[in-house]
Amino acid sequence: MNAQAENPIQGPGTALADWQASTSLAGVMPITHSELVPAGQRLVIVAPHPDDEVLGCAGILAGMKGREADVLMIAVTDGEASHPGSRIWTRSRLRQQRPEESARALALLGLAVDETHWRRLRLPDTAVAGREDELVGRLLELIRPGDRVVSTWQLDGHCDHEATGRAVVFAAAQKKACLVEVPVWAWHWAQPNDLRIPWHRARKLLLGDQLLALKRVAVNAHVSQVTADDQSPAVLTRENLDRLLQPFELVFV
């Protein structure tokens, strides 16, 4: 998850307490892991940046333990633009560090996902929209009919999340795959009963205490994102983490 100039997200965002008081959110029905990824179906995660797969759908991923052969991880960018101007987290360091953090986070979730299950597309961070046609082409090569394809919501509020979301929507439809969208930035800018959220498509994957604790550990594996450097605060602030570590994951189906 990367903040950048075109991103409309500013300030601390909507407080967790406000989301907890949301009648729209309270009314969202639960969905089970087996409904999201039935036995025999492949799970394809398309993450704009290394960490979005854990922030948005760690619970879905953790449920694939023992089914790792049915998991394909697609990293659209290497997340190299998350710390513009930083002397500590340079672009070259982040390009190496962030994919390693992503792999470590999946291991902490209990998944044995080796390099054969990853596709790193290495599109430019914060500039995916300019390569959207290329992304669609790559996705059409990788997605199969019947896949369960999970990616960021196409109206999530971050340019890379939205470009990735649009590309996945198109590719999934072309390949007759089942699309699942997850909000990441929307927790920041949306209001508790926001009519821009597709509540009619929303479902909750409930996370038990143990799984939620695992998700927290996996998120903290993204050291570059959860720690401050000498010039700026952490990308993932306490407010961000509070909203993203609720006892459920919201999905749009």
Image: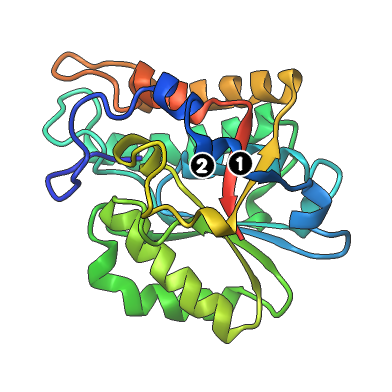
Q: Which amino acid does label 2 sit on?
A: Ser
User: Which residue is found at the position 63% from the left and 51% from the top?
Assistant: 115
37 or 78: nearer the viewer: 37
Residue for badge 2: 24
Q: In which quarter of the image is residue 225?
A: top left
Residue 48: x, y in percent?
A: 41, 53
Please indicate, yes or no, whether residue 83 appears anywhere in the rendered image: yes
Q: How far apart are marks 1 and 2 (CA)?
A: 5 Å
The amino acid type found where label 1 is placed reads: Gly
Residue 249 at x, y percent in the picture = 60, 39
Pick the residue in front: 135 or 173: 173
The N terminus sits in image quarter: top left
Residue at the spot 40% in from the left edge and 62% down from the top edge: 154
* Residue underneath mark 1: 27
Which mark identifies residue 5?
Answer: none
29 displayed left or right of 246:
right
Instruction: Report the side of 110 relative to 233 (left or right).
Output: right
| Image position, residue 236 (x, y; %) | 35, 26
Q: Considering depth in this image, is 233 or 153 the residue closer to the camera?
A: 153
Circles 1 and 2 in contact, beta carbons < 8 Å = yes
Q: Quadrant of the C terminus?
A: bottom right
- Chosen colour scheme: rainbow
Residue 183 shown left or right of residue 150 in the figure: left
Q: In terms of secondary structure, where does tag 1 sit?
A: loop
